[in-house]
């Protein structure tokens, strides 16, 4: 898949997610023909993005009726909001490789996640996470340019983003993260070295600083065949 096709699919995906996240469950969305004309993309490109959201339970196809926003998923917190939690280090030697680093307008959906204007400039980073030299995860990070305008590739491949932010006086304090099952698309599969539609875990995280300002929105795809999560719960 070329970078241009991957970009178009990501743009379509963002548009569809904006529809899903701003409309009540059961609401119909425009037809494929209408969306293709609106977004200036081909039917295969649109259908690939729609298929992903259907697989993830965000859209529902009904034969002869169209596409609808799916019912909301049931959510359970494994750790209470008042519990202090630090993430233990995972096994293996972790490193990151930045695939792309650009500054672009936030757009409607990312702007809402970050609490900034759609026109505000955002640093968008795509990076591959490797463990012992093997690709394990693909991450897309979004940081408002006003938070740290001088972040570079070194900051995302070296000591880590949060250390880089601390060095700039931004004290990261809290994050809200969701995890759910998904499957890899063609572009993700190629980068992770797995077959198309392989099982994976989708992480979405919003991170705030000590003042409550959102300093990061991240979306990550982790290989389901190489990654698992273990939670230790106190039942006293």
Image (tube, rainbow, N blue to C red):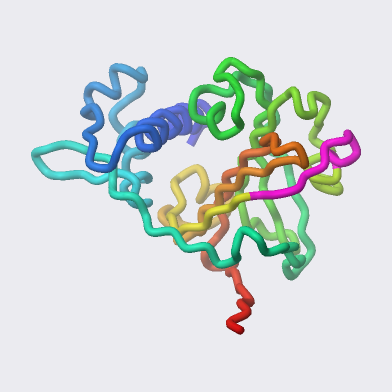
**Residue 214 location in percent, x, y?**
67, 36
Residue 173 versus residue 79 in the image, above or below: above
Q: Quadrant of residue 199?
A: bottom left
Q: Quadrant of residue 123?
A: top right
Name the residue at 68% across, 60% down: 134
What range is drawn magenta here?
A: 164-175
Residue 125 versus residue 192 in the image, above or below: above
Q: Is residue 170 magenta?
A: yes
The quadrant of the rendering that contains the C terminus is bottom right
**Residue 138 location in percent, x, y?**
61, 48
**Observer-nearest of 15 and 73:** 73
**Residue 59 location in percent, x, y?**
30, 44
Visible residue check, residue 45? no
**Observer-nearest of 190 and 209:** 209
- How many numbered circles are shown? 0
Name the residue at 60% across, 29% down: 115
């Amino acid at each position: 898949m070329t970078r241009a096709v991957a970009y178009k699919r990501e743009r379509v995906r963002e548009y569809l997610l904006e529809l899903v996240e701003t409309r009540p469950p059961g609401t119909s969305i425009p037809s494929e023909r209408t969306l293709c004309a609106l977004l200036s993309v081909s039917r295969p490109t649109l259908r690939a993005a729609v298929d992903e959201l259907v697989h993830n339970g965000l859209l529902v196809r009904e034969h002869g009726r169209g596409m609808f926003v799916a019912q909301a998923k049931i959510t359970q917190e494994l750790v209470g909001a008042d519990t202090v939690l630090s993430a233990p280090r995972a096994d293996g030697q972790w490193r990151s490789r930045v695939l792309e680093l650009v500054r672009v307008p936030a757009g409607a959906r990312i702007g809402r996640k970050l609490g900034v204007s759609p026109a505000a400039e955002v640093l968008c980073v795509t990076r591959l996470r490797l463990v012992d030299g093997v690709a394990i995860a693909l991450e897309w990070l979004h940081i408002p340019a006003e938070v740290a305008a001088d972040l570079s590739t070194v900051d995302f491949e070296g000591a880590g983003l949060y250390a880089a932010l601390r060095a700039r006086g931004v004290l990261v304090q809290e994050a809200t993260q969701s995890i759910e099952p998904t499957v890899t698309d063609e572009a993700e599969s190629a980068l992770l070295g797995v077959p198309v539609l392989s099982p994976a875990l989708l992480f979405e995280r919003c991170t705030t600083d000590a003042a409550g300002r959102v300093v990061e929105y991240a979306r990550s795809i982790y290989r389901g065949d190489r990654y698992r999560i273990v939670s230790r719960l106190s039942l006293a």
